[in-house]
Image (spheres, rainbow, N blue to C red):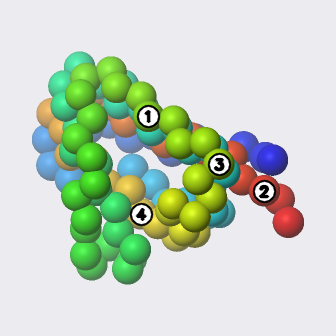
Amino acid sequence: MLPAVEQIVAMTGSSVLIGTLNYPPIKLILDNQSTTSVVLSISLDGGTTKIQWKTFTAGEVLILDDDIYTFPKNTLFYGNGAANGSFSISYTYINL
């Protein structure tokens, strides 16, 4: 397994692109580093359609382990939260 580059962006109060999965993740860490809730959405079609997936409370972290089929390569992640911190996505992948 190799670590992908962390994707982190400050919340602004509107929907912002956090990042794109360049590889299918093996371990995925979703980390709301802000002091308010952040709504996380995903897009599987390049950003045309956004699917609201989960609302993270302030400081909430979710770790998905060995969920290789959960999010495919090129999944886009968007966050919408007040301008009170950042949201981070970190993951590992198999180097084939």
**Given contact means CB atoms under 8 Å apart, are the residues at marks 2 and 4 in contact?**
no
**Cα–Cα gap, marks 3 and 4:** 19 Å
For label 4, the residue is 76
**Cα–Cα gap, marks 1 and 2:** 20 Å
Q: Please tell me which of labels 1 and 2 falls first in the chain.
A: 1
Residue 44, image x and y in percent?
40, 74
Which of the two marks, 3 or 4, is nearer to us in this view? Answer: 3
For label 1, the residue is 62
For label 2, the residue is 94
Q: Please tell me which of labels 2 and 4 falls first in the chain.
A: 4
Residue drawn 58% across the image and 64% down it: 69
For label 3, the residue is 66
SS for dot 4? strand
Query: Dot 1: few (<14), some (14–19), or many (≥20) neighbours within 10 Å?
Result: few
Query: Dot 4: few (<14), some (14–19), or many (≥20) neighbours within 10 Å?
Result: many
Residue 80, image x and y in percent?
20, 46
Q: Please tell me which of labels 3 and 4 falls first in the chain.
A: 3
* Residue 9 showing in the rendered view: yes
- Identified by mark 2, the residue type is Ile
10 sits to left or right of 90: left
26 sits to left or right of 12: right
